[in-house]
Image: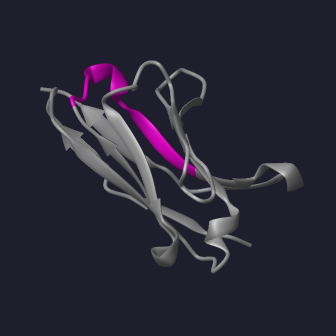
């Protein structure tokens, strides 16, 4: 069993920045692709960003491209989501996901609330 713990959420003004962290309780963290998802109130969960197991490739939703950056440090079993130029529509609960896609292995964190408001 893999435990993922997110942190770093909070209240920020439009245009501000936050950095979310996802700490994994597994020594084989480098086996896992990591993604950040978000779910706004009344909406479906959506994929925000993904980073490959080795950290060599990243992908982003169009809505966050150029503003958010996903990264990881496998030696620290941690991934991050740097969020800049935040907008009110970025308000959501953000979830960390770790997956080994080929093996259908999938773990979720408990989520961290991000609120962008003046």
Q: With 22 as the anchor, is 2 left or right in this view?
A: right
**x and y percent of residue 62 in the render?**
47, 19
In the rendered view, how is the structure colored? one colour
Q: Residue furthest bottom?
A: 27
* Residue beneath the point at 15% across and 35% down: 16
Residue 88, magenta (yes or no):
yes
**x and y percent of residue 98 in the render?**
64, 56
* Residue beneath the point at 35% across and 29% down: 91
Q: With 57 as the anchor, is 79 left or right in this view?
A: left
**x and y percent of residue 83 in the render?**
30, 39
Quadrant showing the N terminus: bottom right
Q: With 51 as the anchor, is 82 left or right in this view?
A: left
Q: Residue furthest right?
A: 103
Residue in the foreground of this view, choosing between 4 and 49: 49
* Residue beneath the point at 21% across and 29% down: 85
* Residue beneath the point at 14% across and 32% down: 13
Quadrant showing the C terminus: top left
Vertically, is 29 above or below 103? Answer: below
Vertically, is 74 above or below 93? Answer: below
Residue in the foreground of this view, choosing between 41 and 53: 53
Residue in the foreground of this view, choosing between 23 and 57: 57
| Magenta span | 85-96
Q: Residue furthest front?
A: 56
**x and y percent of residue 34 in the render?**
59, 52
Q: With 117 as the anchor, is 80 left or right in this view?
A: right
Vertically, is 17 above or below 28? Answer: above
Residue 66, magenta (yes or no):
no
- Residue 69's quadrant in the figure? top left
- Residue 90's quadrant in the figure? top left
């Amino acid at each position: 069993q893999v435990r993922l713990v997110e942190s770093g959420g909070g209240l920020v003004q439009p245009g501000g920045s936050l950095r979310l962290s996802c700490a994994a309780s597994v020594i084989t963290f480098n086996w896992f692709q990591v993604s950040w998802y978000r779910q706004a109130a009344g909406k479906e969960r959506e994929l925000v960003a993904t980073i490959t197991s080795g950290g060599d490739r990243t992908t982003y939703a169009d809505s966050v491209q150029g503003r958010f950056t996903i990264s990881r440090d496998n030696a620290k079993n941690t991934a991050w989501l740097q969020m800049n130029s935040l907008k009110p529509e970025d308000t959501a609960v953000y979830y960390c996901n770790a997956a080994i896609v080929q093996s259908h292995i999938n773990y979720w964190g408990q989520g961290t609330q991000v609120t962008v408001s003046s």
